[in-house]
Image (cartoon, rainbow, N blue to C red):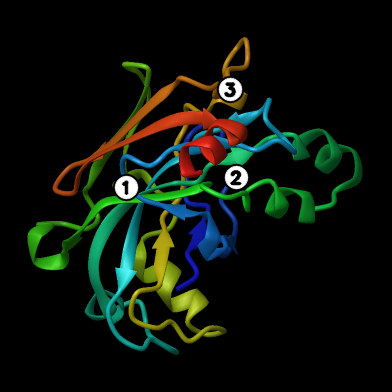
Amino acid sequence: ALPILVRAGALKEMPAKRKFPPGFFKNTNAIIGSGQPIELPRAAPNMVDWECEVSFVIGRTCHNVSRAEALDYVVGHTIMNDVSARDWVPEYLATGNGATNQLGKQFRSFCPIGPCIATSDEISDPHDIEFKLRLNGKEMQHDNVKNSYFQIGDIIEYYSRWLTFQPGDIISRGNPAGVGYAQSPQLFLKSGDRIEMEAAGIGLMVLPVVSEQSAVRMLG
């Protein structure tokens, strides 16, 4: 299952609302679980940033589904961190090459998902889920999916026109204000950091941060 990250934020760091929910893929090799480390890649270690997002999980084959029917295809909800190496930003601003945005999100460990999938019957209102991210104990992001530009029905209706989702596909609902790139001064992840992400009804995900070299030694 390829997660689809859909930009859905609604705060000052986000662009103006578009007519459709823009999105992109993350590769499955980027997926890790709670307790596993985010690796700072040797190719781009200095501007690695966090993006706390609530995601939903497709439960059955989904194609050409209307907004009204969308929740019938959702089996549960989880948390995702759309980790991004922001090195691509200057090139993107200078050239408009959107591919650099994509590549900066594809490194190994750049798609933590967890700590579980809360099934739909465990979430009283999928359009009202509070979520937050802490870095080394300091709250950096805190929002609610009800503030998103696009809700689940909008996302499924638009993308299922083009794609056929399969059970297990994960679609993220976008990122609020509070990323490191927008801080003054800017703040990026470093080895030894600890990220905590939690969402109401889903739980707490903990992610240590290590260098890629340290991760290789740990695996070896």
Residue extending farthest to the top is 185
Q: In the structure shown, which secondary structural element does the residue marked by tag 1 occupy?
A: helix
Determine if residue 75 is in view. Answer: yes
**Proximity of marks 2 and 3: CB atoms separated by less than 8 Å:** no
User: Residue 149 appears at what percent x and percent y?
Assistant: 45, 51
Q: In the structure shown, which secondary structural element does the residue marked by tag 3 occupy?
A: loop
- In this rendering, the label closer to the viewer, 2 or 3: 3
Residue 61, placed above or below residue 11 = below
User: Residue 154 appears at what percent x and percent y?
Assistant: 42, 68
Residue at numbered disc 3: 188
Q: Nearer the viewer, residue 143 or 53?
A: 53
How much space separates mark 2 and mark 3, taking CA atoms?
25 Å
- Label of residue 16 in the image: 2
Q: Earlier in the sequence, mark 1 or mark 3?
A: 1
User: Residue 179 appears at what percent x and percent y?
Assistant: 52, 29
Query: In the picture provided, is 102 more to the left or to the right than 157?
Result: right
Q: Earlier in the sequence, mark 2 or mark 3?
A: 2
Q: Residue at x 60, y 36 (%)?
A: 212
Query: In the picture provided, is 218 more to the left or to the right than 89?
Result: left
User: Residue 69 appears at what percent x and percent y?
Assistant: 28, 82
- Label of residue 145 in the image: 1
Q: In the structure shown, which secondary structural element does the residue marked by tag 2 occupy?
A: loop
Q: Amino acid at mark 2?
A: Ala
Q: Residue at x 56, y 65 (%)?
A: 20
Q: Residue at x 57, y 84 (%)?
A: 162
Q: Quadrant of the N terminus?
A: bottom left
Q: Nearer the viewer, residue 11 or 200?
A: 200
How much space separates mark 1 and mark 2, taking CA atoms?
17 Å
- In this rendering, the label closer to the viewer, 1 or 3: 3
